[in-house]
Amino acid sequence: MRNLEYFELKTLETFKKIFTAKVQEAWEQINRLQDILSLVRKMNALDKCQSQIEKEIQHLSEEKSLTEREIELYNLNFTVVNECLTLRDEKTSNDLCRDAVERELNSELKTLETFKKIFTAKVQEAWEQINRLQDIRYKILCDINDKEEAVSIDSHCLGLDKHSANITLKHNVGSSMFYQDIRYKILCDINDKEEAVSIDSHCLGLDKHSANITLKHNALKSPQSQIPHEAWLENARYLKQRGESEVSASKKLRESIVLPRDQSHNELCTQNEQTNYAMRKRIYETMKIRNELEWQKTVVS
């Protein structure tokens, strides 16, 4: 009688420990899943960063297009100024001289060349920056998609219990499944043993010189693409920081493009007015001299 009571007490304690362990394991699993969900939801900042990158790509592309059109305008002005210098070189020896008009034309030519070099370099920088923004945008989009899939899977796992659909008890994944039909079970067992005999016979004939023999250091190791949870979070933080850094660099680049472009307009307008004034003055002086010569010709004749 005493042994029976001791056995019942021992059995009760055992079941209590098992039940407590299962409950604790379930709560730990739920807490882990909730932590993962909470951390993944915090990664929504990546979505905001991605939107900022999209806008910055659009703004920088617009500035790049405006600067390219500005370079085309400089090329046209450069051609005009160069043609003016070429035509002036066709003057006869008496009128061929170095005057204020030529100085202003050369000054305008140098100004155009300077701004062309500056803005060509800026266009190249803008193109490279757009490529970097597109690269980080693609990586952030991939990371967002991965995290959305992870949220979906973890949310589904968090809602599962023993009453959920398609939930069955797996006694042992490596062992044969339990079949109701004994005849079918025997046939499966026979097939398994025949396959085992075939595999063992093949293994018996293997040695170090056999084909396709390699050393597996750890056949059960994790896949190479699998990373720790901390590294996963760190990658998200890195992408967010890099995205914000590239957006900040792009804004500075846009400012460095807009300001010189406005300055170039003012300088070129000023230089063009000086050149036009020198030309008008030169034309006036030349016509004045020609009129005097015509008058002297009339007087002499």
Image: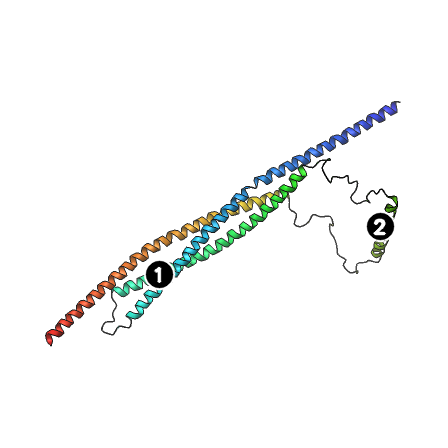
Above or below, comparing residue 203 to residue 84 in the picture: above
The residue located at (26%, 64%) in the rendering is: 101
Instruction: Return the disc, 1 or 2, that comes first in the chain's sequence.
Output: 1
Give the total of numbered labels.
2
Q: Position of residue 177 (x, y in %)?
A: 81, 44
Left or right: where does residue 154 sit relative to residue 197? left
Residue count near mark 2 (Cα–Cα under 10 Å), binned few <14, some 14–19, many ≥20? few
Local secondary structure at mark 1 = helix
Local secondary structure at mark 2 = helix
Marking on residue 192:
2
Look at label 1 and name its amino acid. Leu
Q: Position of residue 47 (x, y in %)?
A: 54, 44
Q: Position of residue 25 (x, y in %)?
A: 71, 34
> Which mark lies nearer to you, 1 or 2?
2
Q: CA distance from mark 1 to mark 2?
A: 85 Å
Q: Position of residue 116 (x, y in %)?
A: 39, 60
The residue located at (45%, 57%) in the rendering is: 124
The residue located at (76%, 30%) in the rendering is: 17
Find the residue positioned furthest to the bottom: 301
Quadrant containing the C terminus in the rendered view: bottom left
Residue designated by label 1: 112
Display coloring: rainbow
Quadrant containing the N terminus in the rendered view: top right
Above or below, comparing residue 72 to residue 178 in the picture: below
Q: Is residue 231 visible?
A: no
In this view, the residue in front, 242 or 275, is 275
In this view, the residue in front, 164 or 72, is 164
Q: Is residue 68 visible?
A: yes
Look at label 2 and name its amino acid. Asp
In this view, the residue in front, 46 or 234, is 46
The residue located at (39%, 61%) in the rendering is: 72
Left or right: where does residue 271 sit relative to residue 137? left
